[in-house]
Amino acid sequence: MKLVKLIANLGYGSRRQVTQLFREGRITNLAGEVLYADDQVAHADIRLDGETLDPPQGLTLMLHKPVGYTCSTKDPGGVVYDLLPPRFRERSPVVATVGRLDRDTTGLLLMTDDGALLHRIVHPKSQLAKVYEATLARDLRGNEAEKFASGKMMLESEKTPLAPATLEVIDKRHARLTLTEGRYHQARRMFAAVGNHVEALHRSRLGGLTLGDLPVGQWRLLDAADLDTLFGK
């Protein structure tokens, strides 16, 4: 692949804009020597303004999503792409969210440009655990855990029962819910089905991954070891 196309695909600009970067001598190799569009150079050895390029296709990142951001590309309010370098929105293939967290849900969100990985994570057969911390408007009644674990619970407008889910009561108005499927607004709808309302919802774990000490609104790239942790290897 020509360097112009490679760098444009990483979101650093259109091909015309990237061509201009070459003309300005801003694209160099490890030794600081100016590169030209037809040069053959390993991705890891290319520098733009002295900085390494973003990873090639296969980029996966973890974002600590705040309240008020949607998992879409356009919204009158904030979107998760606003929290990332602008070029991430322009990459080809696109960096897409792995599933969705609604505007008012915080916590661990994965994003990737690897379609096969995205499919593997969200496919029902993966049964990756999704752990949510819920703050509730009313006291728990005490029978919610049994209902959630029954495998017989039905949500409004659904035609199939939910897979068994685990509820850990932290106190009367706080609970930890572990799901292995990802239906639309599932956690909120489950609590609504037992007569409660979720005031705050935070995803703390996906598979074997946790946010660790990643601050709210920040992101980090994942490596092969992180993906092994995700899938419990």
Image (tube, grey):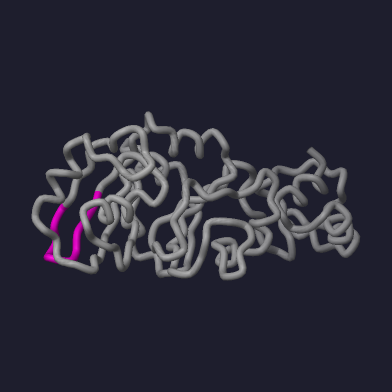
Is most of the magenta stretch helix, strand or loop?
strand
Which residue occupies the extreme top position in the image? Answer: 125
Where's residue 227, x and y in %? 42, 42
222 is higher (above) or lower (below) than 51? above
Where's residue 49, x and y in %? 74, 65
Q: Quick check: is 52 in the magenta stretch?
A: no
Where's residue 54, x and y in %? 63, 54
- Which residues, given as a range, are shown in magenta? 168-177
* Closer to us: 64 or 74: 74
Say which quarter of the image contains residue 22. Answer: bottom right
Q: Residue at x 23, y 42 (%)?
A: 165
Residue 222 in the figure: left or right of residue 3: left
Q: Residue at x 28, y 50 (%)?
A: 190
* Closer to us: 119 or 4: 119
Where's residue 203, x and y in %? 34, 57
Q: Quick check: is 169 in the magenta stretch?
A: yes
149 is higher (above) or lower (below) than 35? above
* Closer to us: 38 or 11: 11
Q: Residue at x 80, y 41 (%)?
A: 40
Residue 164 in the figure: left or right of residue 70: left
Q: Residue at x 63, y 42 (%)?
A: 57
For the C terminus, the quadrant is top left
How many numbered callouts?
A: 0
For the N terminus, the quadrant is top right
20 is higher (above) or lower (below) than 225? below
Which residue occupies the extreme front position in the image? Answer: 157
